[in-house]
Image: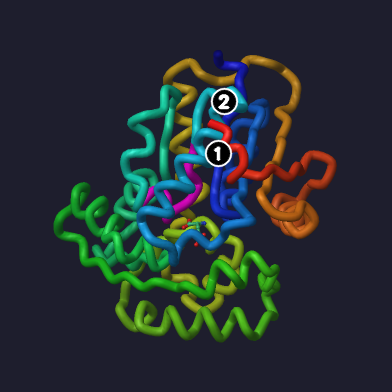
Amino acid sequence: MQNKPIGVFDSGVGGLTCVKELRKLLPNEDIIYFGDTGRVPYGNRSNQTINKYARQDADFLISKNVKAIIAACGTVSSVATSLGDSLNVFYTGVLKPTAKAAVKATKNGKIAVIGTTATIKSGSYEREIMSIHPEINIITQDCPLFVPLVENGFVDNNNQITRLTVEHYLKNIKLSGADTLILGCTHYPIIKHIIRDYMGDNVTLIDSGSATAEYCAGYLSDNNMLNNKESAGTAEFYVSDTTEGFSMLAGLFLNEKVSNNVYHIDIGALAAKK
Ligand code: DGL
């Protein structure tokens, strides 16, 4: 069982922030990634649609015989809250590990959360943080333009459109005096350098993708579920739209060649066959 791959999914390239950290922490693990690039963004869809997509994404990974599933997606983690109940493999979303890391990091008890509209509307981070520490002061902001900017590759440090958008969404958070900022959507760490520039060095940025990878690595290790092969782990990437754009962005972000191992699937047709 432990030599099976780890399955990771997101609506697009965002979940790669989790994959990048997983590959660093667990270099022998095989990873199967699904990015639902044909249906991104999830964050401004209805709860019913997000639940349906999340189920189909998890079913696809189950069909790949994975030992664990990570919903590396703040939106799915916030809205499809019972997804893990029906899966018979280890499952985690990003919410708990990220909230825990933020509570640990804050010194002044003020945490800001940014995420997709669905994530912020769900109140998931407030609930999760309050359950750990009821005294924390929380400020939230949805940033619906960040995901399309990232998916379209507007990630360069000098990109003026992205810089202005960051300023637009983060102005009030900067004024709030929060010392910790949760990047509650896994796409956001891809523009972390721009967010960092705007917020300054005194604010700790919590990357939901990497906090979740750390949690998952700890769980697999504690439960004797780590791959015991000596060779380097492999990665396969599946997307529901064209492979080219994904390969380019993924290669850039992961700092490795991603092209021979990217495959297209028709997620809707696969779900209909079930
Ligand atoms: N990366 C996802 C998240 O963490 C999804 C963003 C989207 O599709 O809107 O919320």
Q: Tell me the SS state at disc 1.
A: helix
Front-most of residues 79 and 166: 79
- The quarter of the displayed image where residue 134 is located: bottom left
Q: Tell me the SS state at disc 2.
A: loop
- The quarter of the displayed image where residue 126 is located: bottom left
Give coordinates of residue 59: x percent, y percent. 52, 33
Q: Amino acid at mark 1?
A: Ala
Q: Is residue 157 above or below residue 86?
A: below
Part of the protein shown in magenta: 70-78
Q: Amino acid at mark 2?
A: Val
Q: Is residue 168 above or below residue 74?
A: below
Provide the residue designation for mark 1. 272
Q: Is residue 94 above or below residue 37?
A: above
The residue under the point 59% across, 82% down is 163
Within 10 Å of the Cα at label 2, are there few (<14), some (14-19), or many (20+) other Cα atoms?
many
Q: Is residue 113 left or right of residue 259?
A: left
Give coordinates of residue 43: x percent, y percent. 45, 62
The residue under the point 42% across, 22% down is 88
Give coordinates of residue 177: x percent, y percent. 31, 76
Marks 1 and 2, the one that precedes in the sequence: 2
The image's mark for residue 66 is 2
Give coordinates of residue 54: x percent, y percent. 46, 45
Q: Residue furthest front?
A: 273
